[in-house]
Amino acid sequence: MRKKIIAGNWKMNKNLEEGLALVSEASNMIKDEYNGNALVVFIPPFIHINAVSKMLEGYENQFSGAQNCSNHQSGAYTGEISASMIKSCGANYVIIGHSERRQYFNEHNQWLAQKIDACLKNNLLPIYCCGETLEERESEQHFQVIESQIKEGLFHLNVNDFLKITIAYEPVWAIGTGKTASTAQAQEVHAFIRTLIASHYSNEIANEITIQYGGSVKPENAAELFAAPDIDGALIGGAALQSRSFTDIVKAMTH
Ligand code: PGA
């Protein structure tokens, strides 16, 4: 059985006090109200990670993560944060290649492949994002775009390292827009990603990899998405900023 993972990406929201209040409420609500097996990941801005990780100590299946990391190990890169720094603050996961990083910070697949390597070298588990823009979907290029994102970002990995990857499919047109991909649209892409993995690695490996959906996931649509055979969780933006909605999405993962 592959892991189910629900992750909340706060993006550039919440000061420290607000962030800790959110984690304190949500982690307790999840502990009290949820008895499923899904892993929960809180992904605050870098500077909150240490405090958030400390707060989560002792909470079973609840972890912290980072939204990005440098592709370099250390050195003269003013303003950058390395994977080893993130690890030393108690995080377990790192989002790599979020569409906002690709779009606003020009992060491309080759660079993201280096970030993946930096994470793995430091025992951090990457959540690698892929997804097409509206224009790419409308011109029916979405499968091609996703294929190159997956191949160029991940397929240099050996099997052992590849098994540490979580993939998040996030159609850019569904992020923060209130427009969710239909369950059928999401399932179609998730199944496609699994075929790509099967042809490069094996069917067995393809079945082991957690593939999250992201893009306007809410308590109202989570259960339907999670019922699809290839959707193994969610990467949540807006709805992760409130303890009630985040907890309710976690509770929608009933298997
Ligand atoms: P959203 O963001 O849930 O606000 O659409 C998802 C994401 O960008 O990870």
Image (tube, rainbow, N blue to C red):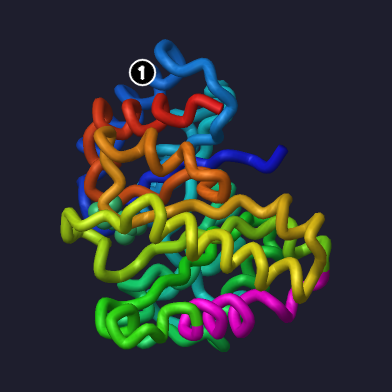
Q: Which residues are magenta?
A: 144-158
Residue drawn at x 17%, y 54% is: 178
Q: Which residue is mark 1?
A: 29
**Quarter that holds the N terminus:** top right
Crowding at mark 1 (Cα within 10 Å: few <14, some 14-19, many 20+): some
Q: Residue furthest left?
A: 177
Residue drawn at x 25%, y 42% is: 239
Looking at this view, is 150 or 65 the one in front? 150
Say above or below: 209 vs 137: above
Looking at this view, is 181 or 101 the one in front? 181
**Residue 186 appears in view:** yes
Say above or below: 35 vs 249: above
Report the side of 117 relative to 45 (left or right). Answer: right
Residue drawn at x 31%, y 72% is: 100
Q: Quadrant of ligand 1?
A: bottom left
Measured from the top left, where is residue 232 in percent x and y?
54, 45
**Residue 89 appears in view:** no
User: Secondary structure under badge 1?
Assistant: helix
Q: Residue furthest front?
A: 184
Measured from the top left, where is residue 7 in percent x and y?
44, 45
Measured from the top left, where is residue 72 in percent x and y?
58, 80
Residue drawn at x 37%, y 83% is: 140
> In the image, is residue 152 part of the stretch drawn in magenta?
yes
How many numbered circles are shown? Answer: 1
Classify residue 131 by image quadrant: bottom left
> In the image, is residue 197 part of the stretch drawn in magenta?
no
Give the amino acid at mark 1: Met
Secondary structure character of the magenta stretch overall:
helix
Say above or below: 212 vs 56: below
Measured from the top left, where is residue 89 in percent x and y?
52, 48
**Quarter that holds the C terminus:** top right
